[in-house]
Amino acid sequence: MSDVEVNDAAVGGSSPPRAAKATVGALTVAVALLWVFPRFWYGPGTPKEGAVWLTPRTEIPGWEFHEEPVDKVAERLLVADALFNGVYTNRQDRTVVRAFSAKRFTENLNDIGLFVHTPDRCWTQGGWKLEPSEPTHLELTVHGVKMVFERRIFVAGGHRELVYFGGMVGGEPTPFRLDHNYSVALKYQVKRPGQRVEQSGLTRALDPLFWRRLWDGFTTRSALAGPKQFIRVSTGILGDDVAAADRRLQAFLPEWLEAVDYQQELAAWEAKQS
């Protein structure tokens, strides 16, 4: 072999093959697209005009309020920046409404999602039984904000509780339902009575309903990340009068919540942090 041939071979041996270069280049482009695409698809993330938080009120005419501390385990899971939990008792008929709100002003990828542990999961794991009921969700307008609330009936020790829960992202109602834990709870507590809800993450990961929320967020171009609010209200069902419990919650929501400017509240919270 000539010196020229030897040198050519040496040079060729020290340079990456063209196929390897092409693979590295393709991977680099793919990573760049994955990084940029969500910013393009989901928009710049600036709230639209009229974006609001729905902020709880403790003073409601005709109701007595009693604050209740949030369970420490639940508090650690939620990692919320603002938590509200309390019981309202009607001064006239002594009916009770339990109200909960959690807000997260920041987004940390290491924190569990604020919408992950819905009552379909937390309540059933806590010993409540899910009672099938219709409708499973309904649209309510609270101070001009149209929100989809999940509607459930849970039973424990002979007590039946009607529960509404829903969420907001970036000062706007979620365009997707928060029913991603519903089918698992239904499967294990209704179709297999006497068994606790399966704790396996694999069971949930294989459930199509669990993943539909991601798809709905993608198709509506609504980001799952960003400042969030989770809202839940519940009341006991007296006798078998479910309709009365529905009316109670629907009348209570606009009394309990008030619409406040999303950007102003977010800016006020950020100012306190600094």
Image: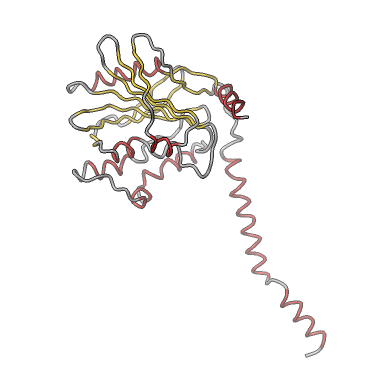
Figure check: 244 above or below 201? above
Figure check: 175 above or below 246? below
Q: Residue at x 64, y 68 (%)?
A: 20
Q: Which residue is drawn at 62% across and 26% down?
A: 271
Q: Residue furthest bottom?
A: 1
- In the displayed structure, does residue 75 sit left or right of residue 127? right
Image quadrant assignment for residue 114:
top left
Residue 190: x percent and y percent? 22, 41
Label total for image: 0
Residue 170: x percent and y percent? 53, 30
Q: Which residue is drawn at 61% across and 59% down?
A: 27
Figure check: 225 above or below 21? above
Q: In which quarter of the image is the C terminus?
A: top right
Colour treatment of the image:
secondary structure
- In the displayed structure, does residue 177 sit left or right of residue 199? right
Q: Which residue lies furthest to the right in this view?
A: 3
Residue 42: x percent and y percent? 56, 38
Instruction: Name the residue nearer the viewer: 78 or 202.
Output: 78
Residue 238: x percent and y percent? 20, 21
Q: Quadrant of the N terminus?
A: bottom right
Q: Residue at x 52, y 22 (%)?
A: 52
Instruction: Name the residue nearer the viewer: 131 or 1.
Output: 131
